Amino acid sequence: AADCFENLLLTGRHVLITAGPTQENIDPVRYITNHSSGKMGFALAEAAAEAGARVTLVSGPVHLPTPDRVERIDVVSARDMLAACEAAMPCDLLIAAAAVADYRPEVVAPHKLKKNPANGEGMLLQLVRNPDILATLAKRPDRPFCVGFAAETDNLLEYATRKLLDKNLDLIIANDVANPNIGFNSEENAVSVIDRQRHETRFDQASKGHIARQLIAFIADRYQ
Ligand code: CTP
Ligand code: CA
């Protein structure tokens, strides 16, 4: 499997990757988001292209250059990301590396919100659930081989395994975001991949580029 790059094991395959955070507008100047840098998703897109795949990278707002031979589609909100992914279907493999905002403001104010003295010192913002992009695509009749990420601060393997089963995935990549040296917004990562037999494969701490190449080799091997 390690030579999937020399053998271009993903030649002729369409790989769809989501990356980065999403931004959910509150008003024209404010939004809700998270600390995702997009680095892991972009590194996976680069590695998949190196393995010969046609790669579509649907990215939230990030500050990263587009990898060579990757088609990048920029989006802002979770709903935009879902629509862009649906438009990019069908694909053979889906890797959902995006940190999608779980909620968005119920209404986006058309004008900049002003402080309201009638509310005293407090402010309530009503939120509603965003669609689950990965679970939605995993339910389609033309379902691809589905790989998710689980970024957790605690109970990593238990929560990751639950997501694998609940979302009907083939593999889930678990990373511990409580460790400041790895994961969100850092240069390095260390992950475990869990399959449907609950077997865990560890990838020790390394640069996101190195981890991405190892993950693409592993995913390509399981996809075969
Ligand atoms: N995901 C997605 N769409 C969402 C939320 C999550 O596609 N609206 C994907 C992520 O890209 C990731 C996987 O689902 O591959 C798990 O995301 P995570 O945030 O860890 O899990 P959630 O299901 O949102 O559960 P929670 O945040 O409550 O732990
Ligand atoms: Ca979430």
Image (spheres, grey):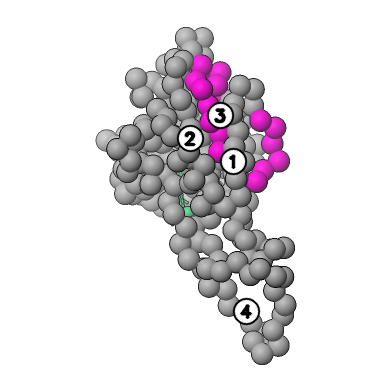
Q: Is residue 151 magenta?
A: no
Residue 59, labelled with which disc? 1
Q: Position of residue 41 (x, y in %)?
A: 56, 36
Q: CA distance from mark 3 to mark 4?
A: 40 Å
Q: Residue at x 38, y 47 (%)?
A: 136
* Circle 2 residue: 88
* Circle 4 residue: 123
Amino acid at dot 3: Ala
Q: Is residue 206 visible?
A: no
Snapshot quadrant of residue 209 = top right
Give the mark, 3 or 4, whose residue is nearer the N terminus.
Answer: 3
Which-is-in-front pick, marks 2 and 3?
A: 2
Q: Is residue 127 left or right of residue 145?
A: right
* Circle 3 residue: 45
Crowding near the residue tagged with mark 1, few <14, some 14–19, many ≥20 C-alpha atoms within 10 Å: many
Amino acid at dot 1: Ser
Q: Is residue 221 visible?
A: yes
- CB of mark 3 within 8 Å of CB of mark 4? no
Give the mark, 4 or 1, whose residue is nearer the N terminus.
Answer: 1
- CB of mark 2 within 8 Å of CB of mark 3? no
From the viewer's side, name the closer residue of 142 and 98: 142
> Which residues make up the magenta segment?
47-66
Q: Is residue 184 left or right of residue 161?
A: right
Judged from the image, the secondary structure of the residue bearing numbered disc 3 is: helix
Q: Position of residue 40 (x, y in %)?
A: 57, 36
Crowding near the residue tagged with mark 3, few <14, some 14–19, many ≥20 C-alpha atoms within 10 Å: many
